[in-house]
Amino acid sequence: PQSIAPQSDRPGGLAQVAHIIAVSSCKGGVGKSTTAVNLAYTLAQMGARVGIFDADVYGPSLPTMVSPEEKVMRMDPATRALTPTEYEGVKLVSFGFAGQGSAIMRGPMVSGLVQQLLTTAQWGALDYLVVDFPPGTGDIQLTLCQSVGFSAAVIVTTPQKLSFIDVAKGIRMFARLLVPCVAVVENMAYFEADGKRHFPFGRGSGERIQSEFGLPNLTRMPIVPDLSAAGDGGRPLVVADPTCAASQDYMQLGAAV
Ligand code: ADP
């Protein structure tokens, strides 16, 4: 990880968080949450204090991808401050861990609620907070970017969805808000069979995007059945099998943020 000067003027429960990393995609289903969760646990394995904020109100994935003992975050009745739940040493906040109270958090002012959940959680001292953005570049994403200072953004996409227009939109949104995009993850880039790499969705677009936008890092993540199985099973692959090839690829991404 780079040593970017930590920011100390963040609101509320974020006051002692050094770096906030946005993991973003233009479209759903490209593996953004898988990337966010495995990146977070990779950073933890590198020795950092880490938290994950799942910013998706309507379809939170964190409760499927990790299985903390405490499935519901505690809330201080007086201050309404939330205590993140925890799994394998990483602090977790998601609308999916809000329990019965989650109904009162749904409504038209989603972006306000997302911001509120992010800033009222008592994160404590963290080196990295990884924020799993909802897909797209709309209101929720803008409000999130404007409410806390992000240190860096990671854009996740798949080869067939590497449309310049969409990826450019994401990169430009972060650029306008002075958040550097430090890496693009070309997810599901290939699979290995019979000792060969196969590129079912085509190849080459990752490099084009990287050179067009001058992005310093491109991580090509293959299709790995174990990655999907681990995510569905509540134990991220980098935790279940830290030495496998995919976990090594996440180490490369972890070094880029
Ligand atoms: P998003 O957050 O972009 O909607 P997810 O991370 O939920 O996407 O991933 C969508 C599905 O694809 C999940 O079932 C996940 O396990 C699977 N998946 C993601 N990346 C990979 C990969 N590299 N190899 C195999 N399966 C993957």
Image (spheres, rainbow, N blue to C red):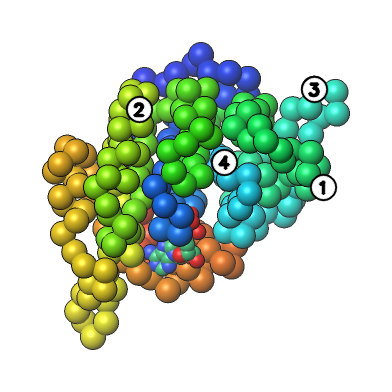
Residue placed furthest toward the top: 9
Q: CA distance from mark 2 to mark 1?
A: 35 Å
Q: How far from the left and from the top, in percent, is residue 249? A: 31, 57
Identify residue type, mark 3. Thr
Identify residue type, mark 1. Gln
Q: Are marks 1 and 3 in contact (CB under 8 Å)?
A: no
Query: Which residue is labeled 4 in the image?
Result: 55
Residue placed furthest toward the right: 77
Tell which tag, 3 or 2, sits nearer the viewer. 2
**Disc sitting over residue 179 in the figure:** 2
7 or 102, which is in the foreground?
102
Q: CA distance from mark 3 to mark 2?
A: 32 Å
Q: CA distance from mark 3 to mark 4?
A: 22 Å
12 or 48, which is in the foreground?
12
Q: Secondary structure at mark 4?
A: loop
Residue placed furthest toward the bottom: 194
At a point 57% along the width and 41% down the height, the residue shown is: 55
Q: Secondary structure at mark 1?
A: helix
- Quarter that holds the N terminus: top left
Residue 13 in view: yes
Q: Are marks 3 and 2 in contact (CB under 8 Å)?
A: no
Q: Earlier in the sequence, mark 1 or mark 3?
A: 3
Tell which tag, 1 or 3, sits nearer the viewer. 1
Q: Quadrant of ligand 1?
A: bottom left
Q: Tag 1: Cα neighbours inside 10 Å, few (<14), some, or many (≥20)? A: few
